[in-house]
Structure formats: C-alpha cells, structure tokens
Amino acid sequence: MIKIYHYNKCSTCVKALQFLKAKGLKFEQLNIVDTPPSIKELSTMLGYLKATGFGLNRLFNTSGEQYRLFGMSEKIKGGMSEFEALKLLSQNGKLVKRPFVLTDKKGTVGFSPEVWDELF
C-alpha cells in the first residue's frame, strides 16, 4: 500500500495525487500538518534517501516559512543530531518536504514525474 503525506494547499502535492490516481494506484493519503510522519517513518525514508545519495536535509521543506523561522539550516549545520531532527519533523509536518510517500519497500519526497514513473 502507498501512503502519501500531503498538504492541500501545495500544488506539487495536488500533482502527485493526480499522478497516483491517473495510474490507478490505491493509496492512503494523510494531511502532513494534522498527521506528520512518525519518527520510524522518517527514519525509514532517511534510509531510502541515503541509499540514493541524499542526506538528512532532504527530509526538510527548505523553502518553507517554518524552516526559516526555526533557523533550521544553522541548526542542521551546527550539529543537530539525526534523532533530534527526526523528532522535530515528527512534531511539525510543515517542516517535512512534501509530498512524502512511503510503500513497504521504497519511498521518496517531493514530486518528479520521472522519478515517480520509476517508483510506481
């Protein structure tokens, strides 16, 4: 089963949902603000991201207001632990890069039709 965390006001999330619907895929959608991913899900996603050459920063919505408000760039560079970052992300869905999509064996953040074609 595909689990997608999204934000209704995010045009990229809308495109991602349309993509899944057009493919005829069944999925569970959760509002990322009301129900952020758990620490376990974030950790799983981080593992997928690391396997493709990305790091912890890829989990963050770096263009978001919350990211700037909390000074996340400096905190991450300043040595924030992985656990501290995952805990913060699990408590504030607006900090999480979206859409955030997990299946039993893979996952990705953001939406790129080319990447999603490979995944689904």
Image (spheres, rainbow, N blue to C red):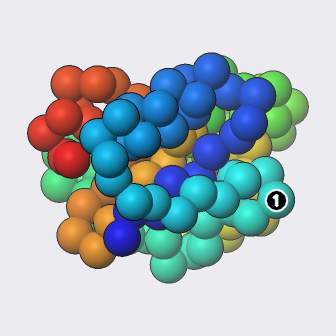
Front residue of 23/83: it is 23
Split into 4 quadrants, where in the image is the N terminus?
A: bottom left
In the image, residue 15 sits, relative to residue 35, either above or below, namely above
Residue lying farthest bottom? 40
Q: Residue at x 22, y 70 (%)?
A: 105
Residue 29, located in which quarter of the rendered image?
Answer: bottom right
The residue at which mark 1 appears reads as: 34
Front residue of 89/36: it is 36
The reply, left or right, for residue 77 in relation to residue 8 is left
Q: Residue at x 62, y 21 (%)?
A: 11
Residue lying farthest left? 118
Residue 37, located in which quarter of the rendered image?
Answer: bottom right
Rate crowding at label 1 as few (under 14), some (14 to 19) or many (20 or more) other CA atoms within 10 Å.
Answer: some
Question: What kind of element bears circle 1?
Answer: loop
In the image, residue 42 sits, relative to residue 95, either above or below, namely below
Residue 52 percent location from the top left of the image: 18, 45
Q: Amino acid at mark 1?
A: Asp
Residue 120 percent location from the top left of the image: 21, 47
Residue 45 visible from this viewpoint: no
Q: Residue at x 81, y 35 (%)?
A: 66
Q: Residue at x 74, y 36 (%)?
A: 8
Residue 76 percent location from the top left of the image: 58, 44
Residue lying farthest right? 69
Residue 92 visible from this viewpoint: yes
The reply, left or right, for residue 119 in relation to residue 14 is left
Q: Exactly how many numbered labels are in the figure?
A: 1
